[in-house]
Image (cartoon, grey):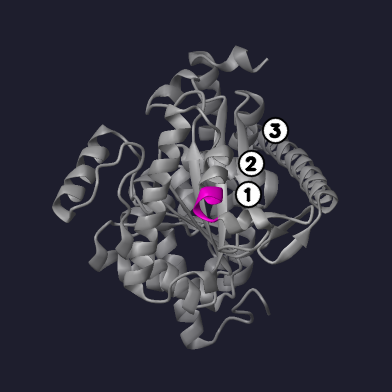
């Protein structure tokens, strides 16, 4: 069945569905929530996050069932409601979308916030939704990005927000042009050339991690390596329906007390992690091994104590027939039970997503055909989103609104834990 859609008509259908969904969802559902940015910021944040989960669920379900894209995970388990900073190599423009498939299966995309460059925010529908979802857009100029990051993290801190933050320390996806720039940076700083990753931007990474840790916004850091075992998708491949069949993710969890405390040490830690990624991915692509094999072998060779069942760097390993993960004893039976629970939750979410968008599609068609009010609402919403983007974006205005309410103390509830 999925082979039917792996062509240009299938790709056109996929992008047509998600583009219409994104634009109409913003105009009809998200737009009426804008006043709650001021009237009740907490309900606004909860409502938008929930709707973002439903919006993201549709393309993720289509990738899985239309194009048979399978995500394979190894390493440490992701648990629902764990507050984390996720760092990942950026091999293609779609890495984040495939990683969201992992989140849909294991945790949730509802509270996932991506830290990314400003470009995607201009895309009609998708960009408007990401702005309202308060994804953190960067100008890639540190003098502008640093105060903006501080404001965004203060907003989440004041909300007592329990979420996850996704960061690509490389700053952009891997391509010939970015590889050339990375090599030029390496030559200037006496670093080796890389073939499978880009040299990370350590200043932003160290600042983000220190701020999130000091603000008590995260409990752990997940270092994730992504690889494409069958083929690496190129920029325009998705437009011909040529998605990869398999995407591998290896996840390594670090508790906060395992990480350095000083900025320079954090920067070096990031550099070391990326040097390891380069070696792991070289074996992955050249020797055709899975990431689980490559990284598992590297951990064994690095420290023989793991084979004896002693905890090293908070990573998972076997001890007396049990899986010891980050200090928690998990038997294979308990692990199987957890995965069954996750599978049931994923199926429940999938059914609710498909039901919601089926109902919404019928409602939208009927409302646009019969209701003049809905048609006017769409026109007004379109004008508001375009104007708001030209004046900084709705992500900027929700921070302004929240800060103003805190100063004037007008809001009845100002954090999610109240």
Tell me the residue that label 3 is attached to. 362
Binning the other alpha carbons within 10 Å of mark 1 as few (below 14), some (14 to 19) or many (20 upward) gives: some
User: Number of numbered discs present?
Assistant: 3
Q: Is residue 417 visible?
A: yes
* Number of the label disc, if any, that sits on residue 61: none
Tell me the residue that label 2 is attached to. 57
Q: Is residue 92 visible?
A: no
Q: Earlier in the sequence, mark 3 or mark 2?
A: 2
Quadrant of the snapshot with the N terminus:
top right
Structural distance between the alpha carbons of marks 3 and 1: 20 Å
Mark closer to the observer (3, 1): 1
Binning the other alpha carbons within 10 Å of mark 2 as few (below 14), some (14 to 19) or many (20 upward) gives: many
Give the structural element (helix, strand or loop) at label 2: helix
Q: Position of residue 162 (x, y in %)?
A: 61, 68
Q: Main secondary structure of the magenta part?
A: helix
Using the image as rendered, state which of residue 405 and residue 18 is in the foreground. 18
């Amino acid at each position: 069945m999925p082979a039917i859609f792996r062509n240009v008509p299938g790709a056109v259908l996929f992008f047509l569905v998600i583009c219409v969904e994104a634009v109409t969802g913003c105009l009809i559902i998200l737009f009426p929530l804008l006043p709650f940015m001021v009237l009740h910021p907490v309900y606004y944040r909860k409502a938008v996050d929930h709707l973002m989960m439903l919006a993201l669920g549709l393309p993720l379900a289509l990738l899985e069932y239309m194009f048979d894209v399978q995500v394979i995970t190894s390493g440490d388990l992701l648990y629902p409601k764990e507050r984390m900073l996720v760092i990942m190599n950026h091999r293609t423009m779609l890495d984040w979308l495939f990683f969201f498939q992992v989140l849909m299966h294991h945790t949730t995309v509802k509270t996932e916030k991506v830290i990314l460059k400003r470009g995607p925010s201009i895309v009609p529908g998708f960009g408007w939704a990401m702005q309202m979802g308060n994804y953190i857009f960067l100008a890639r100029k540190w003098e502008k990005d640093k105060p903006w990051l501080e404001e965004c993290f203060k907003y989440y801190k004041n909300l007592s927000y329990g979420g996850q933050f996704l960061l690509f320390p490389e700053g952009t996806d891997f391509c010939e042009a970015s590889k050339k720039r990375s090599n030029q940076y390496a030559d200037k700083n006496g670093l080796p050339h890389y073939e499978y990753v880009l040299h990370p931007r350590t200043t932003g990474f160290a600042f983000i991690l220190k701020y999130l840790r000091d603000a008590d916004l995260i409990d752990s850091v997940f270092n994730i390596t992504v690889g494409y075992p069958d083929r690496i998708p190129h920029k325009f491949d998705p437009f011909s329906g040529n998605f990869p069949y398999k995407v591998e993710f290896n996840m390594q969890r670090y508790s906060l007390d395992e990480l350095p405390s000083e900025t320079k040490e954090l920067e070096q830690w990031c550099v070391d992690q990326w040097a390891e990624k380069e070696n792991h991915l070289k074996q992955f692509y050249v020797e055709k091994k899975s990431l689980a094999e490559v990284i598992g072998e590297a951990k064994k060779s690095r420290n023989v104590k793991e084979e004896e069942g002693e905890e090293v760097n908070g990573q998972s390993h076997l001890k007396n027939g049990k899986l010891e993960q980050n200090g928690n004893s998990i038997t294979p039976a308990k692990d199987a039970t957890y995965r069954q629970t996750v599978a049931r939750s994923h199926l429940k979410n999938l059914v609710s997503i498909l039901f919601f968008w089926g109902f919404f599609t019928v409602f939208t068609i009927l409302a646009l055909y019969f209701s003049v009010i809905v048609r006017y609402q769409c026109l007004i919403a379109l004008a508001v989103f375009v104007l708001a983007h030209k004046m900084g974006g709705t992500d900027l205005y929700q921070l302004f609104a929240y800060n103003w309410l805190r100063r004037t103390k007008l809001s009845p509830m100002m954090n999610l834990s109240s």
